[in-house]
């Protein structure tokens, strides 16, 4: 189900078995819409029914809070930066955990820039007294943009575009054009633009339809478009090469806390430059440790649109490999 907590959209789903103490948490990429990931998460839960699901959107994509001026045109909401996104997720997670009567095992998944947010969320949870009630089992990073994002192909294009055209203007133009189109035509145009699923299954079609619906809402809101673009611009400035944080994350956490790590990279990723990917793999996976699993395959950075079914299998298999205590449905 969907609920709004502290101005943030949250998708949650109870475990499929009773008396479970395993919470699977997703931090999305940008744009931070959890609707893109529903099929992906549901399929993982089908493989591991003991998972309770909790997906935390990024704040600023709440379409129910659109504000209109006297002419009926939407006014942009305030910008919620990276630090705010980190704080909100820590706040929501602490409240969720504090309400529990017993300790909980946490499994994190993150996508793209969500991995940058995840690293800092985990640090703050471990430094807080709430750490007494949690046991972090696995940290999963899908197509992580945690270093040098501005050097990627898309990062360079975004940086060049923002220098030429102000972000507020881009958001206003895009939402104005979208507002003139009937919803059916808007969704049709979006469906032709987005990458189609490779699999011809009901779940793949469902995932794609969710993505079309979410994207249609996004482009119709100048505030949401501005939030996505402003956040992306800040990513270019902030996600550079923080060696200290990455060393702590990939080395200290597995060694000191026994936390298992999973990082998945695409062979071709327009948001992750090959040099950045290779640097991370050399520094943290050569030689591989028993608590660290790095994988790479020809899958898309935007898997949540076109490859949710395929990547849910990859993710579930990785989680099961890293934590043998998880019991899959096929056993």
Image: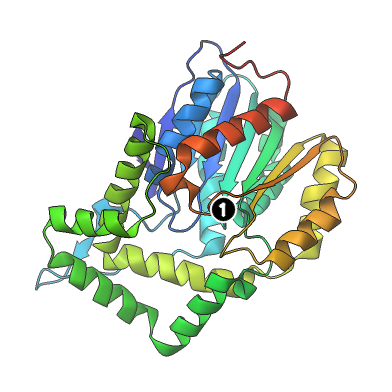
In terms of image quadrants, where is residue 203?
top left
SS for dot 1: helix
Q: Nearer the viewer, residue 300 or 135?
A: 300
Q: Is residue 175 above or below residue 1?
A: below
**Quadrant for the C terminus in the image:** top right
Q: Is residue 93 above or below residue 213?
A: above
Question: Does residue 251 appear to the left or right of 119 in the view shown?
Answer: right
Residue under the point 48% across and 33% down: 41
Q: Nearer the viewer, residue 188 or 72?
A: 188
Residue under the point 25% across and 77% down: 173
**Quadrant for the N terminus in the image:** top left
Residue 265: x and y in percent read 65, 51
In terms of image quadrants, where is residue 182?
bottom left
Residue 78 visible: no
Read off the residue under disc 1.
Answer: 114
Q: Nearer the viewer, residue 192 or 288?
A: 192
Residue 120 visible: yes
Residue 158: x and y in percent read 49, 76
Point out the residue furthest to the bottom here. 164
- Local crowd size for mark 1, using a 10 Å CA cut-off: few (<14), some (14–19), many (≥20): many
Residue 160: x and y in percent read 50, 84
Residue under the point 28% across and 57% down: 192
Question: Does residue 227 appear to the left or right of 239 in the view shown?
Answer: left
Question: Does residue 173 appear to the left or right of 29 in the view shown?
Answer: left
């Amino acid at each position: 189900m969907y609920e709004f907590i502290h101005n943030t959209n949250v998708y949650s789903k109870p475990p499929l078995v009773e008396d479970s103490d395993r919470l699977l948490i997703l931090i999305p990429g940008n744009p931070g819409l959890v609707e893109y990931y529903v099929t992906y998460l549901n399929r993982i839960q089908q493989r591991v029914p003991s998972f309770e699901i909790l997906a935390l959107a990024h704040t600023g994509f709440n379409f129910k809070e659109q504000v209109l001026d006297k002419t009926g045109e939407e006014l942009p909401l305030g910008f919620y930066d990276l630090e705010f996104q980190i704080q909100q997720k820590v706040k929501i997670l602490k409240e969720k955990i504090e309400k529990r009567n017993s300790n909980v095992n946490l499994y994190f998944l993150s996508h793209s820039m969500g991995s940058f947010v995840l690293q800092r969320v985990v640090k703050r949870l471990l430094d807080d007294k709430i750490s007494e009630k949690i046991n972090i089992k696995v940290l999963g990073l899908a197509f992580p943009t945690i270093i040098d994002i501005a050097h990627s192909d898309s990062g360079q294009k975004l940086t060049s575009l923002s220098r030429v055209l102000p972000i507020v203007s881009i958001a206003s133009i895009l939402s104005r054009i979208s507002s003139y189109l009937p919803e059916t035509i808007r969704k049709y145009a979006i469906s032709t633009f987005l990458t189609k699923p490779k699999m011809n299954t009901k779940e793949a079609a469902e995932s794609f339809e969710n993505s079309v619906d979410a994207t249609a809402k996004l482009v119709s809101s100048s505030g949401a478009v501005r939030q996505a673009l402003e956040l992306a611009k800040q990513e270019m400035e902030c996600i550079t090469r923080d060696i200290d944080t990455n060393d702590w994350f990939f080395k200290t956490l597995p060694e000191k806390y026994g936390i298992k790590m999973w990082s998945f990279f695409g062979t071709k990723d327009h948001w992750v430059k090959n040099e950045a990917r290779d640097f991370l793999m050399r520094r943290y996976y050569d030689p591989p440790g028993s608590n660290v699993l790095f994988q790479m395959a020809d899958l898309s950075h935007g898997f949540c649109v076109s490859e949710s079914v395929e990547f849910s299998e990859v993710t579930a298999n990785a989680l099961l490999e890293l934590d043998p205590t998880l019991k899959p449905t096929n056993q």
